Amino acid sequence: MTVEQSVDTLALSVRGHVLRAGDDAFDAARHVWNGMIDRRPKLIVRCAGAADVIAAVNLAREQKLPLAVRAGGTPRFWVPPARIRRPISTMRGCSRC
């Protein structure tokens, strides 16, 4: 399966949102506090729950894509040159199994 086919499958399977370059919300979602940093990931997955996180991580692993995680409201430290960024700030809870 190609990367694009995998992303299409991911977009249909998650409860959250998958943003790609060209989508209306993409530029706002990739913005970080430090204006000197201008990263352009291949996609951004806004996870709505643990299943979305698992699906995004699996896609990155299967397609051998670098992954960055944004886990809070402070994006200033979230600047690695990843192909997939996965902010989890929209999730309302987290628990250990």
Image: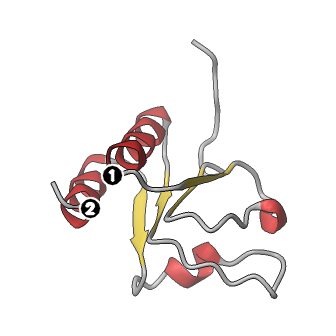
For residue 71, the mark is none
Q: Residue at x 50, y 79 (%)?
A: 25
- Left or right, residue 52 beside residue 7: right
For this view, does 32 lie left or right of residue 9?
Answer: right
Q: Which mark is residue 63?
A: 1
Q: Are marks 1 and 2 in contact (CB under 8 Å)?
A: yes
| Element type where label 1 sits in the image | loop
Q: Is residue 68 above or below residue 36?
A: above
Residue 43: x and y in percent read 44, 68
**Is 71 or 57 nearer to us in this picture?**
57
In the image, is 89 to the left or to the right of 86?
right
Count all numbered tags in the image, as a single digit.
2
Q: Quadrant of residue 80?
A: bottom right
Kindly identify which residue carries mark 2. 3
- At which x and y percent is residue 28? 61, 80
Please, what is the three-letter code of the amino acid marked with disc 1?
Gln
Picture residue at 40% right of the left edge, 87% below the top:
22
Q: Position of residue 16 (x, y in %)?
A: 42, 53
Color encoding of the figure: secondary structure
Cα distance in 3D space between marks 1 and 2? 6 Å
Within-10-Å neighbours for mark 2: few <14, some 14–19, many 20+:
some
Q: Residue at x 29, y 58 (%)?
A: 11
Q: Is residue 70 toward the left or the right of residue 73 in the image?
A: left
> Label 2 is placed on what type of residue?
Val
Q: Earlier in the sequence, mark 1 or mark 2?
A: 2
Q: In front: 53, or 39?
A: 39
Q: Quadrant of the N terminus?
A: bottom left
Few, some or many residues within 10 Å of mark 1 (<14, 14–19, 20+): some
Name the image quarter holding the C terminus.
Answer: top right
Q: Secondary structure at mark 2?
A: helix
Q: Quadrant of residue 68?
A: bottom right
